Image (spheres, rainbow, N blue to C red):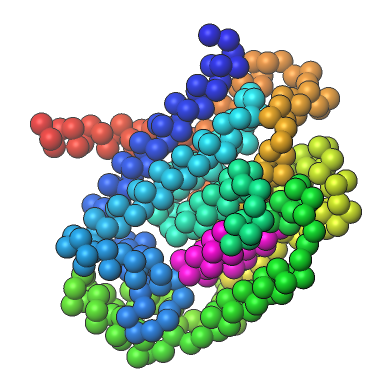
Amino acid sequence: MNQKKFLSNYFLITILISSFIYILWSVKLLNDFPWRYVFTDWIINYEGGYIRRGLLGEVSINLSKFLDLNIKYIFLLIHSSIYLIFHFLFYKFFYKFKKNYIFYILCFSPLVFLYPIATFEAFARKEIFYITFFLFNCFLLIKINNRNIIFFSTNSLVILSYLIHESSLFFLIFFYFSYFIFLKKNNYKIRLSEIIFIIIVYSILLYLLTLPVTDEKISKMIFLIDQNFFEITKYSGAISWLQRSASSAFMFLESNYISSRDILRNFLLLHFLIIFLYLLYINNFFKSEKFFFIFTVFTFLSPLVLFLVGNDWGRFVYILYNFCLIFTFYCLHDDEKIFEKIDKLPIINNLNYNIKIFLTISYVSLWAPKIFYYDKVEIFALFNVVMKLIGYLVKYSLFLL
């Protein structure tokens, strides 16, 4: 078997192993039902009227009633499904590229698959939905040429993303910028009606963000949950965040001390922004349209506003990396040899192959961010996950015996 075929097969094997671990971690999470934060986030619903991030809870509750199945198994079903869909789409999206160590450095960075399972507090958070929606949308952009279908799918996924979690608002520009690149690639002219429609969608979503979550809405929602699922209060986990206004969220920096060390550590975690911008630059992406560079920089940097809102900076870095990765290789998707071309860059071409492999293994396995801005980076992250996995399998194998 030649090296290229081996690397291609290794990609599939790695995706399958990762899918298996994610399912195991989902089952592991279920053992903590209902006390973990994620369950309070997943159960938010529309019983008392519209509440931001309530769509997933509404769907879960109705499925639980329809199937007459405990809500925790509905959570397991939905969460496992979205991770399997993400793995499948990721494989399909990157399948055509010729693979080498550069491919594995970028596509198996700790900020793609490793982070959620290495940092269990970040596992099963709702961002996996809108990351998957963006990946799905980019997949459609390269498979379908009909602009009407693509415009409909883009807006539908934008709205779904927002209804699942309002933090997606800071990443919606990736959806729309990708759509305009689609128009450019297919020589379609931009329609004023589409721009107006996008502005209307943004305006409605911003309006929904300002709607107050009243005590009456919270009380009706909590009563439904208490009577049918599990005990909860207005101070439980994600429920306690619902009554914060959009403006109060920006008081985060006023009430938290952030040292220069915290800023430097998280700034270094954002090294990928330079990498992806450089890859687009050397492959002449910015030459295709004079405003693309400005739009790309703005698209990459605008989500950093989230650092002013919350303290879970590790999650924000993780989300941003996935959007930048998917966006970059959507833009470069026509060149299946892109990773081989990167390897020929003077800065890395002269490195010994064994050194390249060593650096790849080190990069993808020896670190992962934690969830909060003040947390140190976890060292030997992949090794720790493997040891936890072995312990988990031994524990439950003995239990079954």
Q: Position of residue 120 (x, y in %)?
A: 40, 50
The answer to which image quadrant residue 396 occupies is top left
Q: Position of residue 333 (x, y in %)?
A: 68, 38
Instruction: Relative to 314, say whether 343 is above or below.
Output: above
Residue 68 within the segment the image draws in magenta = no
Q: Position of residue 114 (x, y in %)?
A: 48, 41
Give the extent of the magenta segment: 153-177
Of residue 320 and residue 49, the one placed in the foreground of this image is 49
Give the tally of numbered discs: 0
Residue at 59% in and 79% down: 204
Residue at 40% in and 31% down: 17
Residue at 42% in and 36% down: 18
Q: Position of residue 246 (x, y in %)?
A: 56, 80
Question: Which secondary structure class fits the magenta region best?
Answer: helix
- Tell me: 263 left or right of 67: right
Residue at 77% in and 70% down: 192
- Tell me: 93 left or right of 178: left
Of residue 86 and residue 34, the one placed in the foreground of this image is 86
Residue at far top of view:
1
- Tell me: 260 left or right of 58: right
Camera sees residue 381: yes
* On-image quarter of the C terminus: top left
Instruction: Relative to 232, say whether 167 is above or below.
Output: above
Of residue 178 and residue 232, the one placed in the foreground of this image is 178
